[in-house]
Amino acid sequence: MKLTDIADNPGSRPARMRVGRGIGSGKGKTSGRGVKGQKARSGVAIKGFEGGQMPIHRRLPKGGFVNLFRTEYLAVNLGKIQAAVEAGRLAAGETVTVARLAEAGVLGTRRGMPVRLLAQGTLTTNLTIEVDAASAKAVEAVEAAGGKVAIIAKREVPRKEGKKVARRKAQIAKREAREAARA
């Protein structure tokens, strides 16, 4: 076999339709666009347009409410913690904090959020777990395994800062460093 023998399967790449090449081609004159009107022209995008009538997505009322100040928790199930114990990433009898869960890879990539313990899966290991919140069933399951759940007092969760705030903090730090060097 040579490089010149390599080819696509027959019919896998059909030839491009050449429109506007006479009436004998079947796609001549209007090139398959019908006759006149907005849709016959190029660059038309009228999704949701209803001929000047108020579109349905604007006629129907909005519903629901999203609380901007809600606390979003990162859910951690007992089954995941038990899997980490069985894999040797967590030891039986140790105090498991949020930082320790992150080290063990239980929290995944989303860190910095408050953690809530949920009861999905089973826990058979004696652990003391310190989290921001826990469901009643999760607390029962941990205590049934001989462990304990400690709820952390509301802690300050780091928030993402805008560029302006970060720049301002850098300026303040630089100024303080200069003043400290002078003194």
Image (cartoon, rainbow, N blue to C red):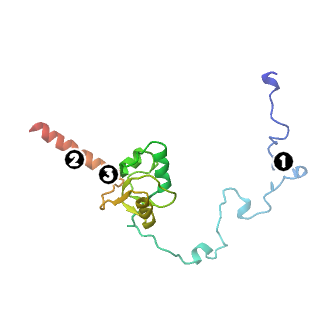
Q: Amino acid at mark 2?
A: Ile
Residue nearest the observer in this picture, 61 or 28: 61
The answer to whether the residue labelled 2 contacts the one labelled 1, judged by CB atoms less than 8 Å apart, is no
Which residue position is annotated with label 1?
Answer: 21
Q: CA distance from mark 2 to mark 1?
A: 70 Å
Residue nearest the observer in this picture, 180 or 80: 80
Quadrant position of residue 103: top left
Residue nearest the observer in this picture, 104 or 83: 83
Sequence-wise, the earlier of marks 2 and 3 is: 3
Q: Residue at x 42, y 45 (%)?
A: 90
* Location of residue 170 in the rendering, given as x and y in whole percent from the top left corner: 26, 45
Sequence-wise, the earlier of marks 3 and 1 is: 1
Q: What is the crowding at mark 1: few (fewer than 14 residues within 10 Å), some, or many (at least 20)?
A: few
Left or right of residue 2: residue 180: left
Which residue position is annotated with label 3?
Answer: 164
Q: Is residue 39 visible?
A: yes
Which residue position is annotated with label 2?
Answer: 172
Q: CA distance from mark 3 to mark 1?
A: 58 Å
The answer to whether the residue labelled 2 contacts the one labelled 3, judged by CB atoms less than 8 Å apart, is no
Q: Amino acid at mark 3?
A: Lys
Question: Tag 1's secondary structure?
Answer: loop
Is 140 rendered above or below residue 181?
Answer: below
Image quarter (top left, top right, bottom left or bottom right) of the C terminus: top left
Is 140 rendered above or below residue 178?
Answer: below
* Location of residue 89 in the rendering, given as x and y in whole percent from the top left corner: 44, 43
Furthest-top residue in this view: 2
Left or right of residue 31: residue 133: left
* Location of residue 134 in the rendering, given as x and y in whole percent from the top left corner: 40, 63
Is 157 rendered above or below residue 49?
Answer: above
